[in-house]
Amino acid sequence: MRSCKFWLLCLLLLGAGLAFAQVPLLVIEFLDVGQGDALLITAPNGKRILIDAGPNDAPTVELLRQRGVKALDLFVTSHNDADHIGQAAEVILAFDIKRYLDQGEGCEKTTRTFGDVLDALVQRMVPVLEPSPRPFTVPSNQGPTLTITILPLPDPRILDNGVCDSNNNSVPVRIDYGEFSLFTAGDAGFPEINWFLNQYPEEQLDVDVLKVLHHGSRNNTNTRFLQRVTPEVAVISVGCGNPFGHPHQQALQLLADTGAQVYRTDLQGTVTITTDGVDYWVATQRSLSVCTALPSPTTDLRVNLNTATQAELEALPGIGPVLARRIIENRPYSSVDDLLRVSGIGPATLERLRPLVRVN
Ligand SMILES: [Zn+2]
């Protein structure tokens, strides 16, 4: 797949091409909704698909109206965290939603935001689909067929303290249009990413464009994953001055090492990808700006391996009383990787614990 690097020239060529022939184009917009995700897909025949709705204070409905949206053929929410479903109820009430697909049974939340989404779905009698693997296809007259594929979710569910781990059961979606492809999976972290890497055929994750997982957190991008995806373009949907420090420098470095061209909604506003199924073009709402808002202070909630109590360690997923005692006996730790010294902790457990622990 060719990405068009000199996009001004590409747009001119595209314009010239359009003047002579009706080239069916697919448009994918990473809407600037602040700290959250909202991905609007406009098929060549005008059908619209939305993946995630942005956080509670996002102008999602207004952004969709500005683009002439009246109905959504499919509305997918990757998972039930507020930065992805914050505006979902408003979207459901404002537009004609043909089908809604979410994380499904077992991952419900007790939050007000999630309750509002359920109420809106009932009020508007929207058909709700389980996230079973399946393709949704949108044919176009002269161009390729757009395929939105819901990929398999971890089975069984990845749990956190015995309940559905919202981030790590994010709905994975692959978009194909001719030779163009894109992968997105909400805030999937290493446990879910490792499941993808182990379960999916090699080529299933190999795409042109990656929606960077979890707003560029260090816990959601690693070399093994990027080597499989080999993205030419990586888009980070992230809010300026967010309290999490997203995107993290480590993730940016890994993306740079991969050779991906990185776009960020905090610096460039809405990022738009247009493709005819052969080439694709990336345009941004504004040229690169600097995010000057200072991150608001945040408390590091990760468990310190060198000072945590037995009870705090037992609260970690997969750590019972025996392993917690062994972790204490093996102190001190100079890095999280030192956990491999602990008998009973292997690489899989280490990866599961990595986002949740620290050493100082
Ligand atoms: Zn998120």
Image: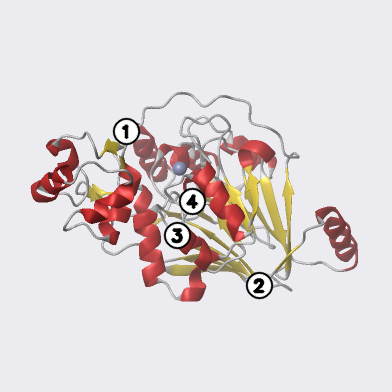
Expressed as whole percent of the image width and height from the top left, the position of residue 336 reads: 32, 47
The residue shown at (79%, 67%) is 23
- Of callouts 2 and 1, the N-terminal one: 2
- The residue that label 4 is drawn on is 213
The residue shown at (55%, 44%) is 95
- The residue that label 2 is drawn on is 179
Q: Amino acid at mark 3?
A: Pro
- The residue that label 3 is drawn on is 172
Mark 1 and mark 4: Cα distance apart in space:
20 Å
- The residue that label 1 is drawn on is 301
Instruction: Give the mark toward the camera: 1 or 4.
Output: 1
Left of 43 or right of it: where is 357? left
- Of callouts 2 and 4, the N-terminal one: 2
Element at label 4: helix
The reply to whether the residue tagged 3 has its Cβ within 8 angstroms of ligand 1 is no
Q: Amino acid at mark 2?
A: Glu
- Of callouts 3 and 1, the N-terminal one: 3
Instruction: Give the mark toward the camera: 2 or 1.
Output: 1
Location of residue 3 by image quarter: bottom right
Location of residue 230 by image quarter: bottom right
**317 and 19: which one is in front?**
317
Mark 2 and mark 3: Cα distance apart in space:
19 Å
Instruction: Give the mark toward the camera: 3 or 1.
Output: 1
The residue shown at (40%, 59%) is 193
